[in-house]
């Protein structure tokens, strides 16, 4: 497969007609790396019914964030501590449990799960939303911190990392600068921020978050090379 907005080849994902459940694919990358676009693309390309999910809806709501973390929490929104990490892991675990009960003969149902989304116009999560999960299908979940949080990483069957492969012409540092530049343009539409504030937050907040993501990816790759069985398998794309 080739991503429609990338010059890099995406490795072909080969799956059996009725693969053994569960089948949860994690898509990880730094801010601005194209996770949402790639998740939607993968959802169309996989051969069975696939549910795309995002961790964006698990931002702590602004009112609660102000009460719990004050102005600093609001400024650093998007950092790991500004997400409801435990709720995200719990909801994903519910889906994994449901998919793990799929029939080995290929029969399976469909069930709706509560899964919050993020309203970019309001800058806050929207609750009360539901997603349909196919018991014999696939789930593609995208987010920054899937590998940073062990309770989430253990729920993934395979990880696809957005970014240049080792030895390519665009190492992590170069990719980081390209993504930050992209965010500075994209985030101009965020409500409540001036252009100067957007640029400053990209250079401070998004850059710091991206470094955390890159460190989690590096640690995951080191564990893979070390043959640690408890980490999900995966590749860079």
Image (spheres, helix red, strand yellow):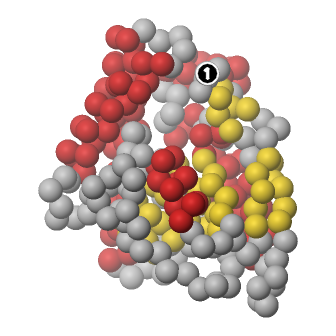
For the residue labelled by badge 1, is the local secondary structure a helix, a strand or a loop? loop
The foreground one among 27 and 220 is: 27
Q: Is residue 229 left or right of residue 57?
A: left
Q: Position of residue 50 (x, y in %)?
A: 65, 63
Name the image quarter holding residue 105: bottom right
Q: Position of residue 74 (x, y in %)?
A: 55, 21
Q: Position of residue 95 (x, y in %)?
A: 75, 63
The foreground one among 130 and 174 is: 130
Seen at 34% across and 25% down, the residue is 184
Seen at 37% across and 62% down, the residue is 2
User: Which residue is label 1 attached to?
Assistant: 121
Image position of 158 with respect to 86: above or below: below
Image position of 105 with respect to 59: above or below: below
Q: Is residue 212 left or right of residue 177?
A: right
Give the quarter of the figure containing the C terminus: bottom left
Q: Is residue 217 left or right of residue 56?
A: left
- Bin the neighbour count of mark 1 within 10 Å (Cα to Cα): few under 14, some 14-19, many 20 and up: few
Name the image quarter holding residue 116: top right
Seen at 18% across and 61% down, the residue is 168
Does residue 62 appear anywhere in the picture?
yes
Does residue 60 appear anywhere in the picture?
no
Q: Position of residue 234 (x, y in %)?
A: 43, 71
The foreground one among 108 and 64 is: 108
Give the quarter of the figure containing the N terminus: bottom left
Image position of 157 with respect to 161: above or below: below
Seen at 44% across and 64% down, the residue is 160
């Amino acid at each position: 497969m080739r991503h429609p907005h990338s010059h890099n080849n995406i490795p072909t994902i080969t799956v059996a007609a009725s693969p053994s459940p569960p089948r949860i694919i994690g898509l990880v990358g730094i801010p601005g790396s194209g996770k949402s676009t790639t998740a939607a693309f993968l959802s169309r390309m996989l051969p069975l019914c696939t549910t795309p999910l995002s961790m964006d809806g698990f931002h702590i709501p602004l009112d609660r964030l102000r009460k719990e973390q004050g102005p600093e929490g609001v400024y650093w929104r998007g950092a790991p501590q500004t997400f409801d990490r435990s709720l995200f892991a719990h909801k994903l675990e519910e889906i994994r449990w449901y998919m793990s009960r799929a029939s080995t003969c290929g029969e399976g149902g469909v069930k709706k799960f509560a899964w919050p989304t993020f309203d970019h116009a309001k800058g806050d999560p929207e609750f009360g939303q539901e997603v349909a999960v196919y018991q014999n299908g696939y789930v593609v979940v995208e987010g920054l911190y899937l590998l940073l949080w062990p309770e989430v990483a253990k729920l993934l069957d395979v990880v696809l990392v957005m970014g240049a492969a080792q030895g390519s012409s665009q190492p992590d540092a170069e990719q980081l600068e390209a993504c930050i530049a992209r965010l500075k343009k994209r985030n101009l539409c965020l409500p409540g921020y001036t252009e100067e504030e957007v640029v400053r937050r990209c250079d401070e907040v998004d850059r710091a978050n991206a470094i955390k993501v890159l460190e989690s990816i590096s640690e995951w790759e080191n564990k893979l090379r070390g043959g640690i069985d408890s980490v999900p398998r995966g590749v860079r794309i």
